[in-house]
Image (cartoon, helix red, strand yellow):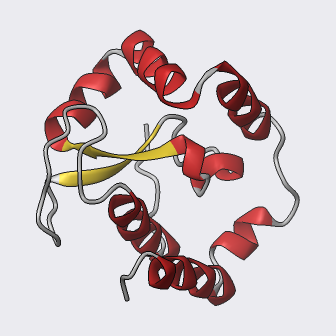
C-alpha cells in the first residue's frame, strides 16, 4: 500500500491533537514532554479518509507502543474508540467518514485551514 503524503496541515494537526490530549497517551496514560516523536496523532480511520482526516473524534494521541498495538488489533482499536466516544458519537463519526464533503481536500490543504488550527492552539495556550 502506498504511503500517504504528509501535508503542512497534517503536521500542525498532529501537534494540535497531542496538545489537546495534554501530551499524554490516551490508552496507557503515559505523559510526554513536548516536542517528541514518541507520541503520535493516531487516526481510527486512516488519513486516506479525507472526510475524517482532520476530525477530532477520529484522532487521539497515542504513544508508539499503543499506536502499534491498536493498529495491529482492529477489534480492540474499535472497542477503544467506542469506549472513548460512546455509541452515539461513534456512529456520527462513522457517518461523517462515509459522507465525503465536496471541496474538503482543497480546504484542508489550505493556509486558511492551518490558520484555523493555529487559533485552536492559541485557545489551548500553545503557539
Taking the spot 41% from the left edge, 16% from the top edge, the residue there is 74
Residue 24 located left or right of residue 85:
left
Q: How far across and how far down the image is residue 80, in percent?
A: 41, 22
Taking the spot 16% from the left edge, 61% from the top edge, the residue there is 37
Residue 22 located left or right of residue 48:
left
* 124, above or below 67, in the image: below
The one nearer the camera, 14 or 19, is: 19
Q: Quadrant of residue 58?
A: top right
Q: How far across and how far down the image is residue 64, in percent?
A: 17, 42
Q: How far across and how far down the image is residue 107, in percent?
A: 73, 74
Taking the spot 28% from the left edge, 52% from the top edge, the residue there is 40
The N terminus, quarter of image: top left
* 73, above or below 17, in the image: above
Q: How far across and how far down the image is residue 65, in percent?
A: 15, 34
Number of dots carrying numbers = 0
The one nearer the camera, 34 or 67, is: 34
Q: Residue furthest top?
A: 75
Q: Quadrant of residue 125?
A: bottom left
Taking the spot 41% from the left edge, 46% from the top edge, the residue there is 60
* 45, above or below 72, in the image: below
The one nearer the camera, 79 or 71, is: 79
Amino acid at each position: 500500500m502506498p504511503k500517504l503524503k504528509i501535508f503542512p496541515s497534517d503536521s500542525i494537526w498532529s501537534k494540535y491533537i497531542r496538545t489537546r490530549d495534554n501530551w499524554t497517551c490516551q490508552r496507557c496514560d503515559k505523559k510526554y514532554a513536548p516536542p517528541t516523536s514518541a507520541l503520535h496523532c493516531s487516526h481510527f480511520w486512516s488519513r486516506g479518509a479525507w472526510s475524517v482526516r482532520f476530525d477530532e473524534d477520529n484522532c487521539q494521541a497515542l504513544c508508539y507502543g499503543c499506536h502499534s498495538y491498536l493498529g495491529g488489533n482492529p477489534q480492540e482499536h474499535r472497542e477503544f474508540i467506542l469506549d472513548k466516544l460512546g455509541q452515539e458519537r461513534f456512529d456520527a463519526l462513522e457517518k461523517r467518514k462515509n459522507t465525503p464533503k465536496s471541496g474538503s481536500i482543497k480546504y484542508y490543504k489550505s493556509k486558511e485551514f492551518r490558520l484555523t488550527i493555529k487559533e485552536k492552539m492559541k485557545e489551548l495556550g500553545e503557539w
